[in-house]
Image: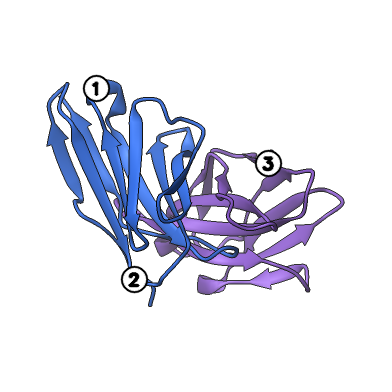
Chain colours: A blue, B purple
Amino acid sequence: DVKVTQSSRYLVKRTGEKVFLECVQDMDHENMFWYRQDPGLGLRLIYFSYDVKMKEKGDIPEGYSVSREKKERFSLILESASTNQTSMYLCASSPRTNEAFFGQGTRLTVV
Amino acid sequence: AQSVTQLDSQVPVFEEAPVELRCNYSSSVSVYLFWYVQYPNQGLQLLLKYLSGSTLVKGINGFEAEFNKSQTSFHLRKPSVHISDTAEYFCAVRRYSGNTPLVFGKGTRLSVIA
């Protein structure tokens, strides 16, 4: 089975902190994604990567950056966390086409 | 660009009744279509997908969906729902060309009432 693992299920951080969300996949997928999920807004794409060291902005990249140094790992970075970044963050991976496989999500609270 | 509209944000239904969750999409290019389910405090799980071929697609847990190209729709159906089907359901599209993200609708919350 494909496994996408997010490093934390729940995180609480203070405003202004630098926050790292880590995601690892074990299926050698080319593509990896970070989505943000908020009630009534569905899943919104923050960034995606189609290869090592390659990245593309999604719909809401402001306040976020990403890193993909190895094929299996895709990190989301909040440079200076703010309360409006309190949300559920979902990582996914996929082959070049076809469906995406999701991790369990990280619920981030910024206080 | 692609977009997905899920026409109902909430659908309450009695147990053992049929249900249809509606999804319309917009795209100028060919797309793959997906339905995902999310149970509370979990990630998304694939229910079914349309890649090509037969327009009626069967998925897990007794769900099925029909691709209608002329109406750009991909509605999800189940003939008889169970309490355990209570969850949020997301419709998504992805361009054929590859190395592109999935675009999601805003979700439909299905509540099954005993």
Q: Is residue B107 above or below residue B14?
A: above
Q: Residue at x 63, y 58 (%)?
A: B98
The alpha-carbon separation of the residues under discs 3 and 1 comes to 30 Å
| Quadrant holding the C terminus of chain B | bottom left
Q: Are marks 1 and 2 in contact (CB under 8 Å)?
A: no
Q: Amino acid at mark 3?
A: Gln
Q: Nearer the viewer, mark 2 or mark 3?
A: 2
Q: Amino acid at mark 2?
A: Asp
Q: Chain of mark 3?
A: B
Q: Are marks 2 and 3 in contact (CB under 8 Å)?
A: no
- The image quarter containing residue A83 is top left
Image location of residue B3, percent across then percent down = 66, 39
Q: Residue at x 51, y 52 (%)?
A: B89
Q: Amino acid at mark 1?
A: Thr
Q: Chain of mark 1?
A: A
Q: Residue at x 53, y 39 (%)?
A: B106
| Residue at the disc numbered 3 | B2
Callout 1: helix, strand or loop?
helix
Q: Is residue A85 above or below residue B68?
A: above
Q: Chain of mark 2?
A: A
Q: Residue at x 71, y 45 (%)?
A: B24
Count of labels in the image: 3
Image location of residue A11, percent across then percent down = 16, 41
Q: Residue furthest bottom?
A: A1
The alpha-carbon separation of the residues under discs 1 and 2 comes to 32 Å
Query: Badge 2 local density, few (<14 within 10 Å), some, or many (20+)?
Result: some
Front-most of residues B5 and B76: B5
| Residue at the disc numbered 2 | A26
| Quadrant holding the N terminus of chain B | top right
| Residue at the disc numbered 1 | A83
